[in-house]
Amino acid sequence: MLISHLCAIIQNVLKPKIKNMKNLWVIAVVLVIIGAINWGLVGLGSFMGTNLNLVNLIVGKWPNVENIVYILVGLCGVWKAVVCMQKKCKM
């Protein structure tokens, strides 16, 4: 419940500043897909005994950037989940 209120507040703050929310929505979808693929590769790499974490392989030399990517993917996932619950998305 708290998360949905926070998301509503964030959307109300962003709407006047972002003319086209569709672009932000597309970015969120892309980040969620990247996160899902990355987690699948992490699991597969774990079975194979190798590092298949794409985020780590691409930006691993910059740990702060890597952490920012993980945070953005997580926030996008929460945002998509809350919006989907509010709209009663069919899965």
Image: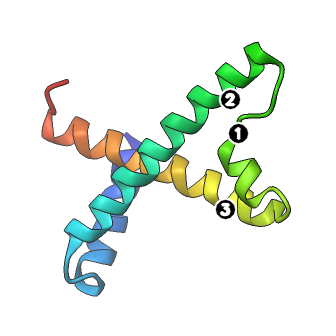
- Name the image quarter holding residue 91: top left
Label 1 to label 2: alpha-carbon separation? 5 Å
Where is residue 42? Give x, y as percent. 68, 29
> Mark 1 is on which residue type?
Asn
**Tag 2's secondary structure?**
helix
Residue positioned 33% across, 76% down in the render: 13
Where is residue 54? Give x, y as percent. 66, 45
Where is residue 79? Give x, y as percent. 37, 50
> Mark 2 is on which residue type?
Val
Q: Which residue is mark 2?
A: 42
Q: Which residue is mark 3?
A: 68
Q: In this view of the protein, which residue sits in the foreground, 37 or 65?
A: 37
Q: Earlier in the sequence, mark 1 or mark 2?
A: 2
> Mark 3 is on which residue type?
Ile
Label 3 to label 2: alpha-carbon separation? 18 Å
Residue positioned 45% across, 52% down in the render: 31
- Name the image quarter holding residue 61: bottom right
Q: Are marks 1 and 2 in contact (CB under 8 Å)?
A: yes
Specify whether 71 is left or right of 83.
Answer: right
Q: Are marks 3 and 1 in contact (CB under 8 Å)?
A: no
Q: Which residue is mark 1?
A: 53
Q: In the picture shown, does residue 82 fall above or below 41? A: below
